[in-house]
Image (cartoon, helix red, strand yellow):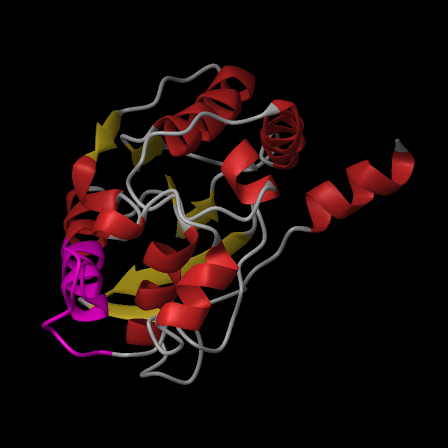
Amino acid sequence: MLYLVRHGQTDWNKNGLVQGQTDISLNSTGVEQAQALAKRFQKENIDVIYASDLKRAYGTAEEIAKVKNMRVSEGLRELRERSFGELEGAEIPLLQEKFPNLGTDWKEDLPLNIESLGNMQKRMVKELTNIMTHHQGEDVLVVSHGAAINVFIHYVTSGENGTGKMVLANTAVSTFTFENKKWAIGTLNDASHWIKEAKSS
């Protein structure tokens, strides 16, 4: 089983700024979300934890690792968010105005050093396949980023879900199995741990 998780909230999420590969830490809400997520996994079997090497993903993974009395195995560059090049730090509405189809345009040649969806998908599929091949028969948790997870979902569902179809909540969990070199999808975009926590506070 692969548990694929989006990181907790950052101030740039809260303020509607394009993060991409800019290394922004979790804010106080993001830490609370990660702690609620960690409680969710307290009784689940997890054999190994990986994360993107960016602080918001690695920090989310560390909260889970604390509860599980584990360590994050590795922070991997290949699990990073899409690079938005020169547009990182811009307001999201401005980005959408300038490039209305950027989130669904699969062209390879994009301006301003923006990473293509295809290149991001290739690196995500390759890295997650490598991880699951290396950990055959184990339950693996990976913390990554919204657009990066969505292109993977797009790949597994042959475009029926993921990119252009779904916005992933902070700390949302999606599950997959990998058997006989084939991916299958389980649950998608489940953030019930945080909804419950928010309602009770």
- Give 49 or 90, whichever is nearer the viewer: 90
Q: Residue at x 88, y 42 (%)?
A: 199
Give the mark count: 0
The magenta stretch spans residue 66? no
Residue reaching furthest to the right: 200
Q: Residue at x 35, y 72 (%)?
A: 99
Say above or below: 102 vs 87.
Answer: below
Say above or below: 44 vs 55.
Answer: below
- Give 173 or 120, whichever is nearer the viewer: 120
Q: Is residue 10 visible?
A: no
Say above or below: 141 vs 153.
Answer: above
> The C terminus is located in which quarter?
top right
Say above or below: 145 vs 198.
Answer: below
- Give 119 or 94, whichever is nearer the viewer: 94
Which segment did they paint magenta? 106-126
- Residue 191 drawn at (x, y percent): 65, 51
Q: Residue at x 24, y 26 (%)?
A: 74
Left or right position of 37 against 51 = right
- Residue 107 drawn at (x, y percent): 17, 79
Q: Is residue 25 visible?
A: yes
